[in-house]
Image (tube, rainbow, N blue to C red):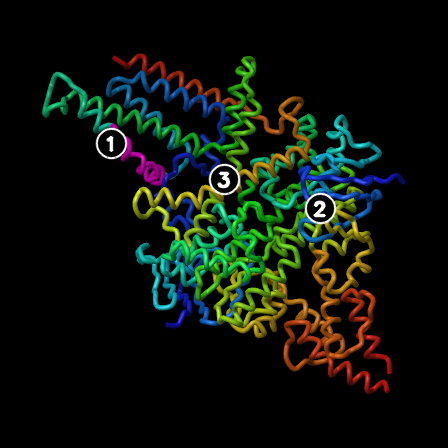
Amino acid sequence: MVMDIVFDKVGYTYQKGTPFQSRALYDIDLMIKEGSYTAIVGHTGSGKSTLLQHLNALRKPTEGTVTIGDRVITSETENKNLKGLRKKVGIVFQFPESQLFDETVAKDIAFGPKNFGASEEEGREIAERMLPLVGLDESFLETSPFDLSGGQMRRVAIAGVLAMKPDVLVLDEPTAGLDPKGRREIMDMFYRLHKEQGLTIVLVTHQMDDVAYYADHMIVLEKGTVMKEGDPREIFRDADWLKSKQLGVPSAVEFANQIQKQFGWSFSTLPLTTDELAREMKPFLLQKEAERQ
Amino acid sequence: MMDKLIFGRYIPGDSFVHRLDPRAKLLGAIFYIVIIFLANNWATYAVLALFAFTAIYLSGINRRFFFNGIRPLIWLILFTVVLQVLFTSGETVYLSLGPIVISQEGIINGIFIFVRFVLIIFMSTLLTLTTMPLSLTDAIEYLLRPFKLVKLPVHEIALMLSIALRFVPTLMDETEKIMNAQRARGVDFGEGSVFQQMKAIVPLLIPLFVSSFNRAEELATAMEARGYQGGEGRSKYRVLHWGRNDTLVMVAFAVLAAALFFLRT
Amino acid sequence: MDKIISVNNVTFRYAEDSARPALDGVSLSIEPGEWVAIIGPNGSGKSTLAKTINGLIEPDSGEVTVGGLLLNEENVWDIRKMVGMVFQNPDNQFVGSTVQDDVAFGMENLGIPRDEMVTRVHDALEKVNMLPFADREPARLSGGQKQRVAIAGIIALRPDIIILDEATSMLDPQGRAEVLQTVKEVKERENLSVLSITHDIDEAAEANRVLMMSAGKLVQEGTPEEIFSYGDRLIELGLDLPFPERLKASLRKEGIDVPETYLTEEGLVEWLWTLSSTK
């Protein structure tokens, strides 16, 4: 079965029918393909977190339909039997360390799998396998999660989501508040899982450089609806538009635009990373060198 | 259902009732709840109801919304009233079945109790709907001032109240966030047997406690860094203004009390 | 002029049996009007150091002097008046129920008369561009706005130095930029010193001096330019690589000679320009 996630004319209104009513999402069409690395960008308050909760039916749309694999979710869908979806689509929420609660790291990681029917031993075994994946060794298994450093807690929380073996992994700013070293290690780990195990990843982020480095599909959300959806390279081409929305562009794109304009160079493709940028710059720099000699 | 319940919430506005001094509103609401026990016949309850409806009208709050918001509580009251009716004996008995007696007095008594409950809820809901929680704490601090003489830590109580109120939305968000995170890990809240539900609440409560303790500690550090050393020698930024309308409202309450004395049997 | 802050050989352990001290013989000083950044990986003792400066933590040995006062139990409250501190979590330092109440909180603690408070709240909110939000509740503010309110609460007390303890690390890029901009403006206008503990490259770039901490010790000191030229080592030190350094590394991979010294983005463009214009 294909685990695509498709939104069709989705809308969501909080506290519908009261004076506190507020519309968070409207008219959303989008598609997250199995095996893709999709980035969702948008400002705080653009509806990102509400949208996220639709990806595994934590919320049901008040309008339209969300299709997750072969399950169709509408406002009429019953709350029963949604649990299976939660196993297929795992969500790492912002500051996920706040979900830790069990006595030991091993038990906390096994919590999800056990809710989905794993036995005590299976849970333990999964925990043992998950720890090295997030860069921690087995010595942590019997530690209380509350004795760990912030960065370690984050890793354990992520392991707790990976432990459910989801087909789709949703990440809500997974590196917020970490130091640069921790940020890099965690982002590299997700990319490895995506490449090696074909895990579908949905990344909600403010870091355009992360979008440039990792994503192959991009969704721009603003004020509760999708403004653009497509290939990141296409979307970043319209740097002025992104800047007018105060979303910014990757630093390589910014710099490439500047030097192309200033030096009259024209690159064959728009470079998104410094490596791509260096590759585009190389012929021009070599040419200059040749002229000099 | 929780979404529709309006008991204890605040709706910003600029009506006559909104603009009253919170002390006047708090005193008035307390006074109303006390004198409601003077009522003992149709006339007195009618006067009280008229007073409450006028107050609601003056608050400018949508009536349909007001009554809808209170509906969830009505069932609770009806339940107590039914019990009251079933177990009150009287002279005119309609039905008697063992310990269960339905009498005319019982029914009338039940209706009165029902009306009393509803009116109390009307007035207290009106108080919170039209008064910022912060202003309410100010009013409470002011009205508690005499108790300083008996060494009641009035300043600390008021500060605790206002910090607690300030953190209510933060903790609500946090609760929702943790619930979502645990639901995403396969927890079903509010499903299954009582035992299963109790078990499901542990992964919610522990993180909430941990984060609240962390918050409290950080908040205490921040307060200390900002020079907080207890109530001694502090000045106050918030002041309350007692206006002519506030006095008028107090007079209205006095008139109401007088009317009740006059009409009661 | 006299130093606004000097920390002399300070050592501190959280528990007597800790494997290593959180601060291990740390000494530093800050001039009036200076902006000093402290970088270092998480757990290197940066925040602990900040807390010794306003007496939130009492060192086991060594001394701290602020504005000429040797910090002790008697003058700790006077020193806290001189040192304003913005913490990491915007929510957990917001005491007041509304923006203006929060700004007034520090002044209430000092017993400043109400009329004076009203003027100062107004001024302080104006300086951080939060005046239109004076009546807002914290739940309806963004992280960046809450941090600006915290800064307003500090400048209302007319301090000499403002300490940013990872004050931008929980914010989105927009919030980060607006807080940094606010600090820059306020620093100039109020003639403050700034001590910022940070992982953010833009914040560190504002500093006159960058100090590096590792395992409770100050290990290195330099101008931002000197520090930024460390290349990949920066990641270990708890700072991101600046864009020009990343591009230089990529160019090197393509076999192109690049200057060893640190270049800003403008510097990089200039270097390319000279490269392409010399005939």
Report the side of C265 relative to A60 (left or right).
right
Amino acid type of the residue tagged 2 in the rendering: Gly
> Which quadrant does the C terminus of chain B fall into?
top left
Residue C21 inside the magenta-drawn segment = no
The image shows a total of numbered marks equal to 3
Amino acid type of the residue tagged 1 in the rendering: Phe
Q: Which residue is found at the position 81% from the left and 75% from the top?
A: C273
Q: Please say whether residue A47 is visible from this viewpoint.
A: no
> Which quadrant does the N terminus of chain B fall into?
top left
Instruction: Kindly identify which residue carries mark 2.
Output: C45
Towards the viewer: C60 or B175: C60
Q: Tell me which chain the residue with mark 1 is part of.
A: B
Q: Residue furthest right?
A: C1
Magenta region: which residues?
A: B63-80
Q: Say which element carries label 3.
A: helix
Q: Please, what is the dominant secondary structure of the magenta stretch?
A: helix
Towards the viewer: A184 or C77: A184
The mark nearer the N terminus, 1 or 3, is 1
